[in-house]
Image (cartoon, rainbow, N blue to C red):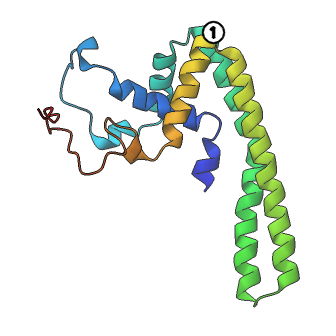
């Protein structure tokens, strides 16, 4: 949960842009070597690099977005810590036995922390969108829509069960 909250500000946009880059034709740049290992694809910063490349961010935009995300991350840290402490308090409360009043109080604290994290995330998203040009915003929103779909529905022929991609189209009957 900690990791999910840490990367909320642009996670949808970044992942969607990564998908868009994967879908781009390979003819754009020949591969210099073997494909990267799986762990290489998960290295920190790779998603940011791919996103900034796909959106065509200039250095000034990159710096502004980094500043926005750093600020959001710093502001969110106390709320993330409150969530972690809340998880520990829940475990301690349940170990003592079920006390509905205590559970409700802990749940209210957790809800408040989650609310603050959501507000921070949406504020950062709004600020980042303000840095982007209209075309970049359009690309980012398209990526966000792609990511909101289940993975099985993202590719060609999505939703057409029983029809393998290699099958030729049916010939018209005379």
Residue at the outermost front position = 174
Q: Secondary structure at mark 1?
A: helix
In the displayed orientation, state which residue is furthest to the bottom. 97
Residue 28 x, y percent position in the rendering: 28, 12
Task: Residue at 71% x, 26% y: name it.
Answer: 68
Q: How crowded is the residue under tag 1: few (<14 C-alpha within 10 Å), some, or many (20+)?
A: few
Q: Locate the C terminus and report the quarter of the image it occupies.
A: top left
Q: Residue 46 sits in which quadrant?
A: top left
Q: Residue at x 21, y 39 (%)?
A: 165
**Residue 119 or 59: which is nearer the viewer?**
119
Residue 29 seen in this snapshot:
no
* Quarter of the image where one finds residue 65: top right
Is residue 64 something that shows in the picture? Answer: yes
Q: Position of residue 45 (x, y in %)?
A: 48, 31
Residue plotted at (63% across, 12% down): 134
* Drawn side of residue 166 relative to residue 147, left or right: left
Foreground of the two, 28 or 72: 28
Q: Would you place residue 19 above or below residue 111 in this image?
A: above
Q: Is residue 92 above or below residue 52?
A: below
Percent x, y for residue 130?
A: 72, 18
Dividing the image into 4 quarters, which one contains the N terminus?
bottom right
Give the answer, above or below, for where 70 lies relative to 107: above
Q: Residue at x 21, y 20 (%)?
A: 31
Expressed as whole percent of the image width and height from the top left, the position of residue 52 reads 51, 19
Q: Which residue is mark 1?
A: 60
């Amino acid at each position: 949960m900690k990791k999910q909250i840490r990367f909320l500000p642009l996670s949808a946009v970044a992942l969607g842009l990564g998908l868009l880059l994967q879908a781009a034709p390979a003819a754009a740049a020949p591969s210099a070597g073997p494909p990267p290992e799986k762990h290489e694809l998960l290295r920190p910063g790779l998603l940011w690099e791919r996103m900034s490349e796909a959106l065509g961010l200039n250095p000034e935009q990159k710096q502004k977005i980094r500043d926005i995300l750093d600020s959001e991350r710093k502001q969110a840290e106390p709320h993330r810590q409150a969530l972690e402490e809340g998880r520990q308090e829940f475990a301690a409360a349940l170990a003592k036995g079920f006390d509905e009043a205590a559970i409700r109080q802990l749940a209210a604290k957790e809800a408040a922390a989650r609310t603050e994290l959501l507000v921070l995330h949406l504020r950062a998203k709004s600020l980042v969108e303000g840095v982007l040009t209209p075309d970049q915003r359009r690309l980012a929103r398209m990526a966000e829509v792609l990511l909101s779909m289940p993975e099985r529905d993202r590719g060609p022929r999505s939703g057409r069960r029983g029809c393998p991609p290699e099958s030729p189209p049916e010939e018209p009957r005379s």
